[in-house]
Image (spheres, rainbow, N blue to C red):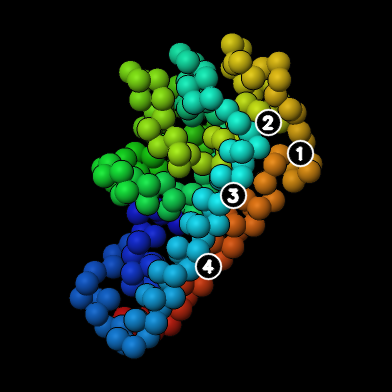
Amino acid sequence: MFKTSTINDIIKYGCYDDRISYKRSARLSSRHASRVTRHGFIMNRIFLYLLRKMYKKLDITLTCEENICRDCYKCCTAAARQKVSDVEQAYIKKYLQEQNLPLTLMEDYEKFLNDRQNLYDRSAHNILCPFYDRDKKHCFIYPARPYSCRIYGSFSVSKDDLPGKCIYKKTTKIYREKELFKTVPYSEDYASIASAYKIYIKYIAWWGKFFYKI
């Protein structure tokens, strides 16, 4: 998975490199650098637009009251096994910028995602998502929350994935992973956007390095 913190570097400089600097990026041919930058900026906006459009359609289909879970926030801990794609991380980062929220939250979020992947470490299951406000009992990036958070509860692979007191326990729709596209609304649209964005990131990385002088 590409680091979210480097997505802006990919878009701006047309290359993927954790050690990127202004001096090194200046070595790019100005003509090609401008072309890659312009192309990257446009494509990035298109992907985020497609994701936002899909989110809106999904929210209409799964009408849900915010804070409906009240005091329960189990799905906002590492015990919930949702995945977050690269394009969604870029979308969240853009939302943080628009809301003037500290971008350092993304670093905390990336760490949270890494901890959540360790399903065998039971101690990691109680780690709370950095975007959840326990005092106000709500997610402060709720409009930009990932796809997996939007469908959590309404759909699940097993009732055991839901907390014992979850309000969705009796109504959740169980699906098999092979039947994901047929059961969960807009899952195929989401998968297409996420996969295409991943390919796009690799393309931008290759194209930028092609003109990158070491």
Q: Is residue 94 left or right of residue 161?
A: left
Q: Which of the two discs, 4 and 3, sits closer to the camera?
A: 3
- Classify mark 1: helix, strand or loop: helix
Q: Counting residues from the N terminus, which is met first, the one under dot 2 or under dot 4?
A: 2
Q: Counting residues from the N terminus, which is met first, the one under dot 4 or under dot 3?
A: 3
Q: Residue 155 carries which label?
A: 2
User: Is 135 rendered above or below residue 106?
Assistant: above
Q: Position of residue 89 (x, y in %)?
A: 44, 49
**Cα–Cα gap, marks 4 and 3:** 19 Å
Q: Counting residues from the N terminus, which is met first, the one under dot 2 or under dot 3?
A: 3
Q: Which of the two discs, 2 and 3, sits closer to the camera?
A: 3
Q: Position of residue 166 (x, y in %)?
A: 59, 16
Are discs 3 and 1 less than 8 Å apart at CB?
A: no
Residue type at mark 1: give it. Answer: Thr
User: Is 77 rendered above or below residue 70?
Assistant: below
Task: Give the residue at mark 3.
Answer: 54
User: Residue at horizontal 24%, vertical 69%?
Assistant: 21
Q: Counting residues from the N terminus, which is met first, the one under dot 2 or under dot 1?
A: 2
Task: Give the residue at mark 4.
Answer: 200
Are discs 4 and 3 less than 8 Å apart at CB?
A: no
Q: Could you classify mark 1 by the number of other residues whose Cα lies within 10 Å: few (under 14), some (14-19), or many (20 or more)?
A: some
Quarter occupied by the C terminus: bottom left
